Image (cartoon, rainbow, N blue to C red):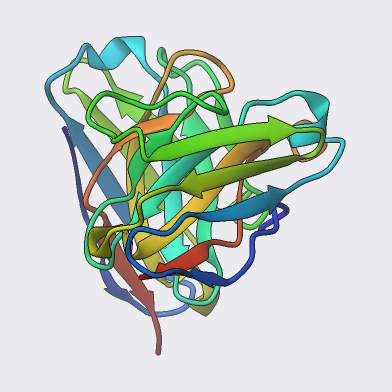
Amino acid sequence: QLVESGGGAVQPGGSLRLSCAASGFTFGNYAIHWVRRTPGKGLEWVASIRFDGSKNYYGEAVKGRFTSSRDNFKNTAYLQMNSLRADDTAVYYCAKGSATYPDWFDPWGQGTLVTVSS
Amino acid sequence: QSVLTQPPSVSGAPGQRVTFSCSGSRSNIGAGYDVHWYRYLPGTAPTLLIYGNNNRPSGVPDRFSGSKSGSSASLAITGLQAEDEADYYCHSYDSSLGGYVFGTGTKVTV
């Protein structure tokens, strides 16, 4: 099970940190992926972090502004979002990777809403 | 950005079969990367429906099947039921982008 938190309303240029708390599996064995959903664009891959946190990958839209990290002792992944823009407004999901790189994503959390507006 | 193209919507009567495509390119599906499918219902988390082109996770009815050929993939739903009304997304990896890509999504109406 994955549970996201940390979403909310923020002004353009602001920052938010999302958390993804995991349970029910050996967290440190799997990559964690972040995906966002907007009504207009559907699903968009945002970021991925390797099982051991040694490497991160980012979508072009967020590269240089978002940073993913994880604490395998706390079974939690994080997405630090800086320089937020209106088009970052979305529901953000974290998902567990399948460990068969490239991964499929399963399961997903319920999502947390991020609204960027002045 | 969505580099996998799906029809915006398909519809069918209860009991019918519907199928819809996920069209990619030589850097994703055509490069041999697997295609996965997810179902999304508003207000809920997306759920895995098909993985590795044509494999169903436990609990997914065999009414759902996936296939892949060349740079495209398809999802078929047979014996359409009212509960199948949802948005469906395909998913793969793109070597040119160096990351994952999703389809534009297809809304199934029963």
Find residue B94 and report its image quarter: top right
- Which residue lies most toward the right here? B26
Image quadrant where one finds the C terminus of chain B: bottom left
Residue A67 rendering spot, x and y as whole percentages: 48, 42
Residue A88 rendering spot, x and y as whole percentages: 49, 68
Q: Please, is residue B32 above or below residue A114 in the view? A: above
Q: Please, is residue A15 above or below residue A9 in the view? A: above
Q: Nearer the viewer, residue B62 or B15?
A: B15
- Which residue lies most toward the bottom here? A118
Q: Nearer the viewer, residue A34 or B9?
A: B9
User: Would residue B28 be visible to someone looking at this image?
Assistant: no
Q: Nearer the viewer, residue B102 or A62?
A: B102
Residue B11 rendering spot, x and y as whole percentages: 47, 71
User: Would residue A101 be visible to someone looking at this image?
Assistant: yes
Q: Nearer the viewer, residue A106 or A13?
A: A106
Residue A62 rendering spot, x and y as whole percentages: 59, 54
Q: Please, is residue B105 above or below residue A35 in the view? A: below
Q: Residue at x 83, y 35 (%)?
A: B27
Q: Residue at x 26, y 52 (%)?
A: B45
Find residue B41 and report its image quarter: bottom left
Q: How many marks?
A: 0
Image quadrant where one finds the N terminus of chain B: bottom right
Q: Residue at x 29, y 34 (%)?
A: B60
In the picture, measured across the screen, residue B92 lies left or right of residue B97, that is: left
In the picture, measured across the screen, residue B92 lies left or right of residue A28, that is: right
Q: Residue at x 22, y 11 (%)?
A: A26
- Which residue lies most toward the front here? B15
